């Protein structure tokens, strides 16, 4: 147990944390330690630890397995769940069968397995979220070893079929229990369930058949995307095992705050200060917009906090062909200092109101 990975400690949450609390904490830590934002030498390793912890705790099913068995259920290709042991419907009954029989049929270790998914975060500007953009991101992922083409054997050699299991990765054993004699299939101990024996391992990957690579991947971010949304890149995750397909890459978007604009669904909000004269008499102003500038007339008698809507110059809807609007909120500013002439004018004005 001394070497158990404490994923809760890695993310800084307790075991009673909700899925939403875990996600929020992950996003905060991932942003803090992302190598693009944090140039500290240890940031990259910390980011990997955070990502690995979230891969488990962010998935309710994997989290339940981790809470029950710890990290012993985690393999390089995902979570191994065999026999009755993973079923909560049988209560402790499954554990009894596992104790005597080791589960029904066991797990076929050399079966093709889908690679683990990768989750990362990238930051874009307010304008990029509004109009869409093509970004290039860097991702660390596991790939088949390029030196041995994923075989694990030195170039020019090939792995041999295991003599104990004849390349099946499984052996059948006879077990005796208080219930009688039973036949059980389990992973071959000679080849660790792989079905192959590597007598001359690859000098680069040391026989693991895999290597970690840092890749630059292009991602198309659609116009109108919102903060914290995820984009899935199919088969861009870690390599599968035993001929299985790669996992997926999930990119979560973090949108920077704009200097003057804020977002309300697909509308763009702009707060504009005006003086007493403009509010009382009206005016025509040239205002910034996402696409440049726009003109808006202020009617006389405008009150502070009044909201005006300019149609069709907001943020595009992702599922519809139209755009949101720009909302302009005027705030009447009270002057802190007045000249003597201004004071006289206000004094005369006050006598007529």
Image: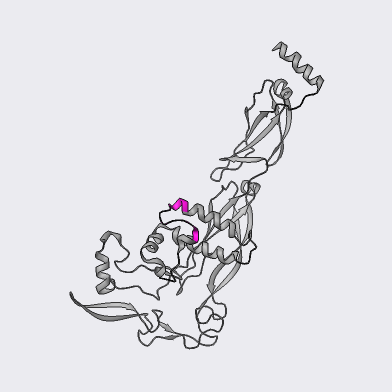
Query: Residue 181 location, x and y as percent?
Result: 20, 78
Identity of the residue drawn at 53% across and 51% down: 229
Seen in the picture, residue 305 relative to 8 is either above or below; the reply is: above
Identity of the residue drawn at 64% across and 64% down: 40
Q: Is residue 269 left or right of residue 152?
A: right
The quarter holding residue 279 reads: top right
The quarter holding residue 252 reads: bottom right
Query: Residue 104 location, x and y as percent?
Result: 28, 71
> Which quarter of the rendering shows the C terminus?
top right
Seen in the picture, residue 202 relative to 257 is either above or below; the reply is: below
Q: Is residue 62 magenta?
A: no
Seen in the picture, residue 80 relative to 60 is either above or below; the reply is: below
Query: Residue 90 location, x and y as percent?
Result: 26, 61
Identity of the residue drawn at 30% across and 77% down: 185
The region drawn magenta spans: 10-21
Visual colour scheme: one colour
Q: Is residue 121 visible?
A: no
Q: Is residue 19 magenta?
A: yes
> Which quarter of the rendering shows the N terminus?
bottom left
* Marker count (numbered): 0
Is 136 or 33 nearer to us in this picture?
33
Q: Is residue 307 visible?
A: yes
Query: Residue 21 location, x and y as percent?
Result: 47, 51
């Amino acid at each position: 147990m001394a070497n158990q990975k404490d994923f809760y400690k890695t993310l800084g949450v307790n075991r009673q944390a909700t899925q939403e609390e875990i996600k929020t904490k992950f996003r905060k830590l991932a942003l803090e330690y992302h190598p693009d934002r944090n140039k500290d030498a240890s940031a990259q390793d910390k980011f990997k630890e955070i990502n690995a912890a979230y891969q488990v705790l962010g998935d309710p099913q994997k989290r339940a397995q981790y809470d029950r068995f710890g990290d012993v259920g985690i393999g390089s290709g995902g979570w191994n769940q065999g026999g009755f042991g993973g079923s909560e419907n049988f209560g402790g009954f499954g554990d009894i069968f596992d104790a005597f029989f080791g589960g029904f049929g066991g797990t076929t270790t050399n079966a093709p397995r889908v690679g683990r998914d990768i989750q990362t975060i990238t930051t874009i500007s307010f304008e990029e979220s509004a109009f869409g953009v093509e970004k290039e991101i860097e991702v660390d992922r596991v790939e088949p070893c390029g030196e041995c083409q994923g075989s694990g054997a030195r170039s020019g050699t090939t792995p041999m079929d295991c003599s104990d299991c004849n390349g099946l990765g499984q052996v059948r054993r006879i077990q005796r229990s208080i219930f009688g004699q039973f036949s059980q299939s389990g992973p071959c101990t000679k080849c660790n369930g792989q079905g192959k024996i590597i007598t001359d391992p690859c000098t680069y990957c040391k026989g693991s058949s895999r290597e970690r690579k840092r890749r630059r991947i292009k991602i198309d971010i659609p116009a109108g995307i919102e903060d914290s949304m995820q984009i899935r890149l199919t088969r861009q995750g870690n390599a599968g095992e035993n001929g299985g397909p790669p996992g997926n890459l999930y990119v979560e978007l973090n949108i920077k705050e704009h200097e003057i604009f804020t977002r309300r669904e697909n509308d763009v909000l702009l707060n504009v200060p005006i003086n007493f004269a403009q509010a009382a008499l009206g005016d025509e102003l040239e205002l910034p917009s996402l696409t440049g500038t726009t003109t808006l007339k202020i009617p006389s008698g405008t009150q502070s906090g009044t909201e005006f809507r300019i149609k069709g110059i907001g943020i595009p809807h992702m599922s519809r062909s139209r755009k949101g609007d720009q909302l302009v909120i005027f705030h009447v500013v009270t002057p802190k200092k007045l000249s003597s002439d201004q004071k006289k004018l206000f004094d005369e004005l006050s006598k007529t109101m």
